[in-house]
Amino acid sequence: MSDFSFVSVLQTLVAGLGITILMTVVSFAAGTLLGIPLALMRTSKLWGVRFPAMAVIDISRGIPPLVWLLIIYYGLSPALPLEPLPAALIGLSIISAGYLAENFRAGIDNVHTGQKEAAAALGLTPSNQFWRIVAPQALNISIPPSASYAVALLKDTAIASIIGVADIIFLAQNEVSRGGSAVFVFAVAAVLYLLAGIPLSYFSRYIDGVVRSKVVSV
Amino acid sequence: MSEPRVLLDAESIEKSFKDNEVLKGITLKVHAGEVIALIGPSGAGKSTFLRCLNYLERPTGGSLSLDGAPAFTDPLGPTKAELLRLRRRVGMVFQSFNLFPHLSVLKNIVLAQKLNGLRGNLEAEEYARELLGQVGLDEKAHAKPAECSGGQQQRIAIARALSLDPELMLFDEPTSALDPEVGNDVLNVMRDLADRGTTMIVVTHEMRFAERVADRVLFLDRGGILEEGAPEQVFHNPSHERTREFLQAVLDR
Ligand SMILES: Nc1ncnc2c1ncn2[C@@H]1O[C@H](COP(=O)(O)OP(=O)(O)O)[C@@H](O)[C@H]1O
Ligand SMILES: [Mg+2]
């Protein structure tokens, strides 16, 4: 006999929480690693460097996340058979890279032009102007929106269940197909997402406050 | 007595933005130790001229010499090394301070000394503290710029520019963003510099300061120097109607 008590459903779904968090953390980290160079290319003066970065960013953000995952999982499989989890990680990383690159680019653009000029007037080389003066401020500016994005990403990982990643939603669907009440089971899933998101939201608000008090440029 | 040496020799500096001719060939010789006040209506090209002197703006014509030697082999195509050298020798203070908000006050003043290989860490910090003392802000060494008032920030910006021991200091309306009382602290620091023999070019609307501190006043109008002379002459006996109108307008504010 199946047991669909709160505790039992919770225990089943918690098994997927780790996968959900793993997908969030890995794709956010990979998105940052890819997003920074993309943002640098995107702000280049050279069209030949800027354009490919723009294209990659726009494509990664322009295609619905679900479609990305379906393409990578089903589309690439004849050539490159992938397990659901790696496929999801690749897709979510590509999407994160696009969003985070745009955050970093906006950070770079929002550093006051006077900063670079002051650095230039002090005889700093263009590379020092960027790395010592512009980049740290750009990073500060881009942290709050990126922290918000992490919260959005946590929720977006739910689509990975469609290609069979055993995350919270995948396990919830199993429970429902085994006869659990859909409303009840998904409500428990919702609670899990909320709980996982609380530290992230709290952290992103905290970072926002720190950055605001730190970078009050005139 | 020999004539004091010419420190800066700007020869027919021209600057156009697309087809907007902003500077129409400005020639200016500045002697070592001289204080020049640059006055003129908004949009006359004062900032642009100042920015051409350290190549933040690249002139479209003319040439610069510093201490008798041309700053560039080809003034229209400066090399990176020439640019850096010029900027290390010419300090600039901006209307909006432009301190680096992510660095402490001390690091603001230390950074360029170190990156330019002028001084090591300890020496640079020591010198930064000395300069902070000179502008009356020893106690702010570890503050962030955002924790300092506008007037303090501008004095820190002056200390930062001085940290490279520039031969020439450029000031672009250093007090225009400040309340008058606070502005006076900044003007006092500048007067102090002038008394120590610093060569400076100051764009300003502070006519009293210009009259007291400047050796020479230039009136810039529509991209050219319309009138220049000793402060008494330019302020009290201007030879052009435009100068008179401008001074009247400033007085009426
Ligand atoms: N970066 C720029 N691009 C285009 N036009 C500029 C730029 N900087 C200044 N100008 C123009 O040059 C003229 C002189 O400006 P500026 O030197 O700032 O005058 P001032 O400092 O005397 O008020 C103005 O008409 C201004 O619009
Ligand atoms: Mg100006």
Image: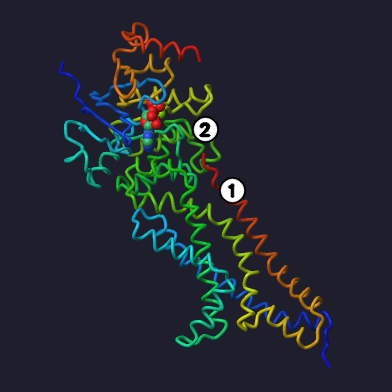
Instruction: Tell me the quarter of the picture where residue B20 sits.
Output: top left
Residue drawn at the location 68% of the way across and 81% of the way down: A170
- How is the protein colored in the picture? rainbow
Classify mark 2: residues with Cα within 10 Å, few (<14), some (14-19) or many (20+): many
Residue A98 on image: x %, y %: 50, 64
Q: Residue at x 25, y 47 (%)?
A: B80
Name the side, left or right, on which B225 lies relative to A159.
left
**Of B184 and A185, which appears nearest the observer?**
A185
User: Label 1 to label 2, Cα distance in Å?
Assistant: 19 Å
**Residue under the image location 55 percent in, 43 percent down:** A216
Of residue B217 and residue A53, the one placed in the foreground of this image is A53
Q: Tell which of A108 and B176 is nearer to you.
A: A108
| Residue A216 in view of the camera | yes
Q: Amino acid at mark 2?
A: Gly
Chain letter for mark 1: A
The residue beneath circle 1 is A212
Mark 2 — residue?
A: B150
Q: Position of residue A39 (x, y in %)?
A: 44, 59
Which image quarter is the N terminus of chain A in?
bottom right
Q: Residue B197, relative to residue A86: is it above or below?
A: above
Q: Secondary structure at mark 1?
A: helix
Kind of element beneath mark 2: helix
Residue B47 shows up from this direction:
no
Tell me if residue B109 comes above or below residue A127 in the rendering. Answer: above
* Chain under callout 2: B
- Residue at (61, 53) in percent of width and height: A208
